[in-house]
Amino acid sequence: METVRALAYARRHRSRLIADLGAMVRFSSVSADPARRADVRRCASWLAGRLKEAGFDEVRVLPMKGRPLVVAEWCRLTGSPTLLVYGHYDVQPPGPASDWRTPPFEPVRVGDHLLGRGASDDKGPVVAQVLALEAWLRGAGRLPVNVRCVFDGEEEVGSPALAAVLRSTPSRFRADAAVVSDTRIPSPDRPAITYALRGSIGMEVEVTGGPRDLHAGAFGGAAANAVEALCGVVEGLHDRAGRVAVPGFYGRVRAWPAAELASMARSGPSDADLLRAAGGPPLAGGPDRSLYERTTIHPALNVTGVVGGHAGPGTGAIIPHRATAKLNVRLVPDQVPREVASAIGSHVRQSVPRGMASRVRVSAWSGPVLLDRSHPVLRTAALACRNGFGSDPVFLRSGGTIPVVESLVRHLRIPVAMIGMALPDDGMHAPNEKVHLPTLHRGVETVIWFLSELGRLQPNGGSADRSFPGPAVKAS
């Protein structure tokens, strides 16, 4: 009966979800941009107020060096499980305004979609989580489990502050399980639970020649050119077949059994699905593996940007003395971020022409995660998806990285249910990002069902299929 009341509350307040999402999109909470720190803080303050309104006993905004954590607690049930609800309210930079059909921080409703930066990643799922929790607190009168919310203001830059807290004082956010809704589903009528994430390393490679730029007429043909040297370094990161050419890069990459590959082929997206989502053909990799395999169980090294020399009007008659490339590396079990970063650094230093200097910086890293699909918490999430979406979910691997998930697994040793609400064509991290509102509404009901079913599990002991039998997870 309580679940029915919570569902009824959520259905009566669907317009509130849309209004909340519009309010959040208006905050340009770009964590990577120091000029937008004030908007990050304003978004955190708004979210804290919304959680208080939802009925939480304790709500706090923790400063965390200008990119705050918003935390809330309702822990009244002695002997009941505690669920950690995680999401993030920071967003990626919007990029050039000319690439957007509508202003990135102005929510625009187009049919069943709402457009705006962060609408899908991750503000839409956050407001869905909050409405689901409010539906229990205001509609049913109480939550069926204890809940700790942690909403992050720097996920898009690797969650360094939250990761440090989880590493140094894990008891601060102690829980029996976590739910994260920062992943994708194949289609509005096909829910998904993500059970594996790739790890990530952010790196920057700088190549320098002389102390300053030189006149291209006076020194052309005699002076070292940092942009040209960097281009050679970048070209040497891959071989002609598209494989990473760094020695040792694939040393720890595991070979997956045929049964796992067959399961992936049955449940995962087809090559056509991924090509359609990408908007064009892949430019690297071999025909011996599917695109889904290449983006989930195989590592990748991506050059995400190159800066150097003259970029203004005209040709610029200079010889650049400095150039920089930004790299993003995706890792799979059982690769170790520190080892991979060291191997890339050594390879870069050996590739720089004599007489030129190089510097390799690592900005952030996070290891890969692999969850046990048979764990009771993930089975409970599957049941919730069936109730919320009306169909059984598929279990999927993701090529993406959610740094906090690895921290939760490694330091809290708890299972994490990654229940997706985003669609492949939402344009996450791209211009014209959007979210499908009917899918968000189903996501709200799925979270309501997840809380309901989680309340029937026992935190310590109980029957084999209704308990938390240890971590049953691995952060590789």
Image: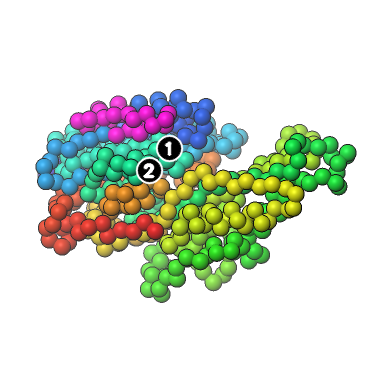
The picture places residue 450, in percent across and down from the top left corner, at 23, 49
Camera-nearest residue between 144 and 69: 69
Q: Amino acid at mark 2?
A: Ala
What is the basis of the colouring in this image?
A: rainbow
Comparing labels 2 and 1, the label whose residue is closer to the camera: 2
Total labels drawn: 2
Q: Which mark is residue 87?
A: none
Please give the range of residues in magenta. 48-71
Q: Relative to 444, is 345 above or below?
A: below
Name the residue that disc number 1 marks.
154
- Look at the image and tell me in which quarter the C terminus lies: bottom left
Disc 1 element: loop
- Look at the image and tell me in which quarter the N terminus lies: top left
- The residue sitting at 64% across, 64% down in the picture is 239
**Residue 213 covered by magenta stretch:** no
- The residue sitting at 84% across, 37% down in the picture is 215
Q: Is residue 396 left or right of residue 76?
A: right
The picture places residue 233, in percent across and down from the top left corner, at 68, 54
Disc 2 element: helix
Q: Relative to 247, is 338 above or below?
A: above
The picture places residue 464, in percent across and down from the top left corner, at 15, 62
Camera-nearest residue between 232 and 274: 232
Name the residue that disc number 2 marks.
163
